[in-house]
Amino acid sequence: MTSSSNLQVTEYFSAKAFSSQVSGGGNDTKPDASNIEEAESSLRDGDSLNYEEARVLLGRYEYQKGNVEAALRVFEGIDIAAAIPKMKISLSMIGKPDTRRSQNYAAPPFSINTVSLLLEAAYFKSKSLQNFGRYREAADSCKIILDVIESSFPVGFPENLGADHKLKETLSNTIELLPELFQLADSHQEAILSFRRILLHRWNLDKETMANIQKQFAVFLLYGGGQDGNPPNLRFQTEGSFVPRNNTEEAILLLMILLRKASLKKIKWDPSVFDHLSYALSISGGLGSLGKQLEELLAGVIDNDERRLLLALCCYGEGDRLSALNLLRNVYENTSKNNDSNCGFALLLASKIHGESSSFNEGISTAKRAIDAFNDRCDGMVGVAYSSLGVSLSADSRAVGTGDAERVKQQSEALESLETAGRLTGLNDARILYRLSLENAEQRKLDAALCYAKQLLILEGGSHVNGWMLLARILSAQKQFRDGEIIVNAALDQTGKWDQGELLRTKAKLQLAQKQVKHAIQTYTQLLAILQVQHKSFGSQRKNLEIGEKHHRRLEMETWNDLAMVYISLSQWEDAEACLLKSKAICNYSASTRHTEGMLYEAKGLHKQALKAYKHALDVDPGHVPSLVSIAVVLRKLGGGSGPVARSFLNEALRVDRMSSSAWYNLGLLLRDENPTFLREAADCFEAATVLKETEPIEPFR
């Protein structure tokens, strides 16, 4: 294109822009069709610009001015499809080395500038179609650009065209636009294929642009929804190389490549890449791999304390609490960094780990230090630290061996800490609301517990099973069994089949509390059917879902035990024995299974066999309260001066669980029968049993 033709176009555009300003049209003025045709006619009369080039320049001008509809009309008048063969020939000839091109007698059909203009027209046409929601047509226009360049340069975009050439700019824009268009068109599989096509061909674009495409692809694979795409079919693949089996694995591979490039300083460090990789590996059970990636990062890429904190999270997720605590100590034991946010987060995590390891004193002390670290900086995080303190105090109050006075004090402090946490977070943290409701419920402050549970349900929108379960248990403690069942039914309607196990078990217990034995058996049967289907599903992917499978197998065992207890209450011994056989097949060494077996023997009047079964339960779990109480009951029935021994079992049961109404009641019976001088103590035990029974849920709150 000559300079005179450039001047002609420039003069036309200047005149056009000036006339628009005079008429007051601005960017919102739609050009008249006759004006467009007149402009095209004047451009066609030029010596150097052909008809298609003129339309491209005019269309680009209208698009950049904001007249998208007019621009689209111009671009749709360009027959790009007819020019594709000539564009491919021209580009393939231009892409050859000069020594080979000089031997050809014929010149390329189009100049590089003409090809660039035509491909730019295809790009602007795509953008115009996108503006009107015609995403599929826009994607087809984008694909023309990639088809032309890919077929013209099969070994890669030639370096001799220069990085600043307009063609390369159009290519870069197209590469970023095409996957976006398929996503907007809800074409999940085609979006994946477009990303792969872009990443597998050598476009010779700058590293940051390609890194951005890789990141966008990984994000789409992780969060884009839809079914897993087919595994990538690599053209150059060595034997034994890794091929991703699903979207998550492909995203992890892409993010690891980006992380490696950033570590080697080939691209800029992008913290969001590591965030996405952390999420991907955590949902796929790969926290150990994430830890290795952290260790391989070169010094200076991320802060050392942040690296230790992230490594601690990985170790904690893998179950290595000791290593996690050692890493956390390296962060927070440096007193000069007490005001650093990493220090506060490390203290919070340490408090959580100490609480789970029954090191409650350490959990309390680290939570208090976390409060100091976040104080005067972030009320929300101070609230979270107070919540952690409340959890540790509550756990310490329930610890075996804690005196009554100390227990009451710690329970009061725990509730006060949780209330402070709720106030600082504006009761907008679901975890804090749950803990507030749970702590009030366990201290039998049921009205407050119910209020917090309802707030939790509203805040979460019923999205978590735990909130529904807690509300149903609180209602059962208030003896509102029918309301509790209604709540469970509402939860079942909003919960997927795979997550209904605990809800169905609670529903069956609520039905039993209402004397609806037949309905309860039907609910238990429904639950067992779901669990058996789940077990078969877990069989094909046991490695990744081992924890989930263990949980469901334990739930299945407890369900068989529950069902056995129902049949025992109906004196249907054979059915009860059949349920116990199923339970033992899952786990023969279970305290609850052995206890249920003892209950069957006791119901049959076989007290010695029952006593043996209860003792087997204590061999598995020395603190199993139902078995401790049942042994005392059987010993009392057998008589023979075994009162002191029975009392020792009941005292042990109360040492483990002060809220056991059954232990208090049976202790009262023993004291009443043992000696008339213990009648006052017996009356106190009966009173405690009565109060606790009135507020006892159908199953433990926690």
Image: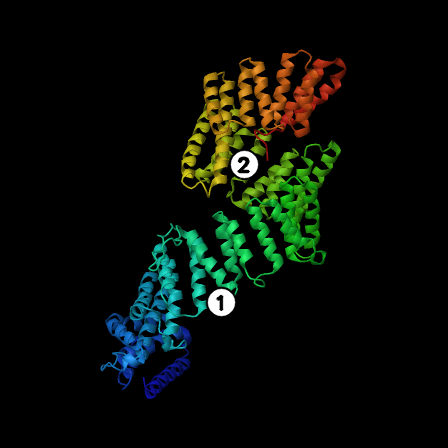
Q: Which mark is residue 266?
A: 1
**185 to 119, vertically: above or below:** above
Give the image quarter of residue 82: bottom left
Q: Nearer the viewer, residue 330 or 459?
A: 330
Q: Quadrant of the C terminus?
A: top right
Q: Secondary structure at mark 1?
A: loop
**345 to 95, vertically: above or below:** above
Give the image quarter of residue 62: bottom left
Q: Percent position (x, y) of residue 322?
A: 62, 45
Amino acid type, callout 2: Met
Q: Quadrant of the N terminus?
A: bottom left
Q: Which mark is residue 469?
A: 2
Q: Nearer the viewer, residue 476 or 107?
A: 107
The residue most toward the top is 640
Q: Is residue 250 left or right of residue 681?
A: left
Q: How is the image coloured?
A: rainbow
Amino acid type, callout 1: Lys
Q: Is residue 362 left or right of residue 450?
A: right
Q: Nearer the viewer, residue 214 or 45?
A: 214
Q: Percent position (x, y) of residue 260?
A: 49, 61
Residue pictured at 69% horizontal, 58% vertical: 337
Residue pictured at 56% horizontal, 63% vertical: 301
Q: Which mark is residue 87?
A: none
Q: Nearer the viewer, residue 675 or 508?
A: 675
**486 to 569, vertically: above or below:** below
Residue pictured at 58% horizontal, 14% vertical: 608
Q: CA distance from mark 2 to mark 1?
A: 51 Å
Q: In this rendering, does residue 380 appear at all? A: no
